[in-house]
Structure formats: C-alpha cells, structure tokens
Amino acid sequence: MSLLRIAHYPEPVLLTVGKPVLENEFDADLERVVSDMFETMYEAGGVGLAAPQVFDSRRLFVMDVPDEKGLSNKLTFINPEVITVEGEQVGEEGCLSFPGVFQTVQREMRVIVQAQDVKGERFELDLKDLAARCVLHETDHCDGIVFLDRMTTLKRQLAKRKIKALQKTGKWE
Ligand code: NI
C-alpha cells in the first residue's frame, strides 16, 4: 500500500470528465488503486476520495461515512451513476483537493446510486444525509465538477478569496 499525492484545485485533472473503468480493468491493479485510495483518504482525514483527486482520470471513488453507531462503512463505487435524487439538504462541505476550505453547499437529501464494486459486481444503494451528500460530491469529481461549482455565487466568491489567501501561505501547491 502507498499514499497517493492529492491534486489540489485548480489541477486540470480535477476539471476533466473521468473515463469509465473498462471491463478488462477490473484486476489486481484496480484493487491496488482502490486500497491506496482508502489509505490516502484515511491519512488525510476525509470521508470520500475520487480517482481524479489522485491524478487518475477515471470514474471511481471510495468513501467511508460512519453509520449512526460510528462504525466504519467502507464502500467503493466504480462507474457510479446517480439514478434518482430527492429532497434537499444544506450543510458545510470540505474537499481534500481544497485543504482548509469549508463552505455551505446545497445538495439533495436522498440519492439512489448504481455502481460496480472492485470485482465488477453491480449494486444499488439508497442513501441519505451525509452519505448522500458524499456520493453526490464524489460522483461530481468523476464528472470533472468540484464543490466550488455547486456553491451560490456569493459563497463561491468567499471560497475563491480564501483559496487565494491559502495559496499565498505556500501550503497549497
Ligand atoms: Ni472533494
């Protein structure tokens, strides 16, 4: 296992639509990528991480949003497709590609998502609250969309100002 370098906005890979993972790519290499992505996500303290965030322009992401008892719930979504969304929630979001930036984002409350696991098996999940928010945020990454794009104009201006200030500190490469 190894830690992967995380792409920080505005790396072009974050703004590029990911390629689908092909049937012949479900192999040991893909399992290693997924395992490295989990390790990288845990190390960085995130609950979700998409492949484009580690310079791999493909449609997959990992997430671990603990359940109501606080237990780990590791999930891998390969070729995710959002099937249905419902309701809305407004809450603060962060992103490992925007270190130190937290901003309010409106998302749907519930999502039904289909994807493949690391073995290529198809599954469907019906998620809400933070898990739904995370699926929507990470699926966006797979489509070259970042949370900045989901903010209101005012919040986006605030976030961009914060990014500029953080870039000046040199901690944002
Ligand atoms: Ni993110």
Image (tube, rainbow, N blue to C red):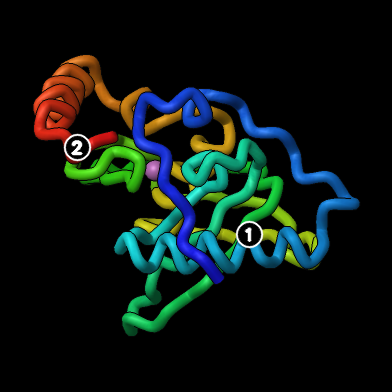
Give the mark, 1 or 2, whose residue is nearer the N terminus.
Answer: 1
Assess disc 1: are there few (<14), some (14-19) or many (≥20) residues with their C-alpha within 10 Å of its C-alpha. some
| Location of residue 34 in the rendering, given as x and y in whole percent from the top left corner | 61, 62
Where residue 50 is drawn, which disc sits there? Answer: none
Spot the residue most to the right: 24
* Residue assigned mark 1: 33
Q: Is residue 97 above or below residue 73?
A: above
Q: CA distance from mark 1 to mark 2?
A: 29 Å
Instruction: Describe residue 103's horizontal placement relative to residue 173 as left or right.
Output: left
Q: Is residue 11 above or below residue 136?
A: above
Question: Looking at the figure, which quarter contains the C terminus?
Answer: top left
Where residue 103 is drawn, which disc sits there? Answer: 2
Between disc 1 and disc 2, the foreground one is 1
The amino acid type found where label 1 is placed reads Val
Where ligand 1 lies, by image quadrant?
top left
Q: Under tag 1, what secondary structure?
A: helix
129 or 5, which lies in front?
5
Q: How many marks?
A: 2
Question: Looking at the figure, which quarter contains the N terminus?
Answer: bottom right
| Location of residue 124 in the rendering, given as x and y in whole percent from the top left corner | 68, 59
